[in-house]
Amino acid sequence: MSTEEKVASHYTHGSLETAILKTLTDNGRDIELLRVSDLAGVDEFHLGRHAATVEFARDLTLAGGMRLADIGSGLGGPARHFADSYGCIVSGIDLTEEFVQVANSLTARCGLTELVSFRQGSALSLPFESGGFDRATLIHVGMNIQDKAKLFAEVRRILKPDGRFGLYEIMQMREGSVPYPMPWAMTPETSFVCTPDTYRQMLEDAGFVVELEQDRSALAIRLMHEMRAKAAAGEGKGMATLMGPRASERGANVNTSVEGGLLAPIEMIARAV
């Protein structure tokens, strides 16, 4: 089994849409007529969740009509935000077929199919034309990709000159062993966490200039504490089901690593030159 097949298998749930719709129904949502805001908390599994997506989108200077490629689009939460809030035309791609199916279904329930679509595919061989996009995003995806040089070369290929590539990735900030299981990998076999220095150099080699870099740890930690408080109050039930096996242990490992300064969610905005 290839690394990509192992990664797709890791994220495959089997009955994900059913679990999400049940969680939404239990929370009083009308699943036949959803708003993007109704999905907050169930369709964005990166650190900082929707609050981080909002900040990230602002830094990308998005505008109506822009074409945006969301690489490793998952369940489509960020893509729907980019379209709903800014009017971007978003093409998402993800390795996991189940994620693609659920992302398209939730997008239809939100009435956004004219602006947002998803397909299955590899970030190392993007099924998009060269120079066709104004923006590209990568949100908590690089940890599963070893060949980041090829990844960044592909992103540069599909972007227009002066297009922006936004990354929001978990990076290693100091020496130390990453504890497993993590949300993105049960073992080190499919985990490829790198330092910010490595990302900067690889981006430069691929034809980018990093124009903005921010450590979003404070936001992520604040959200962690809020989620713990909700869990203690009996709120937020259903999330463990969505995350899969050993969810509590995986969440605790990444939270401890960020709070201890071993890992950090880093945002970078790079311009194609």
Image (tube, helix red, strand yellow):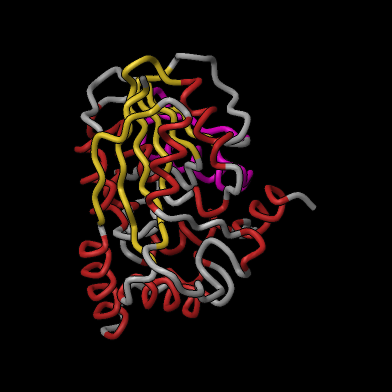
Residue 33: give x, y in percent of width and height: 35, 43
| Residue at 24% from the left image edge and 21% from the top image edge | 64
Q: In the image, 123: left or right of 107?
A: right
- Magenta run includes residue 228: no
Residue 24: give x, y in percent of width and height: 38, 59
Q: In the image, 179: left or right of 209?
A: right
Quadrant in which the C terminus appears: top left
Residues 171 and 82: in front is 171
Please report the bounds of the magenta region as a residue range: 94-121
| Residue at 44% from the left image edge and 48% from the top image edge | 198
Q: In the image, 53: left or right of 165?
A: left
Residues 117 and 15: in front is 117
Query: How many numbered marks does the figure carry?
Result: 0
Residue 269: give x, y in percent of width and height: 30, 37
Hey, which residue is sitting farthest right in the picture? 1
Compared to 63, does 230 lie above or below? below
Compared to 195, does 262 lie above or below? below
| Residue at 64% from the left image edge and 54% from the top image edge | 7
Residue 37: give x, y in percent of width and height: 26, 48
- Magenta run includes residue 109: yes
| Residue at 32% from the left image edge and 53% from the top image edge | 266
The quarter of the displayed image where residue 192 is located: bottom right
Compared to 48, does 225 lie above or below? below
Residues 219 and 206: in front is 206
Residues 225 and 116: in front is 225
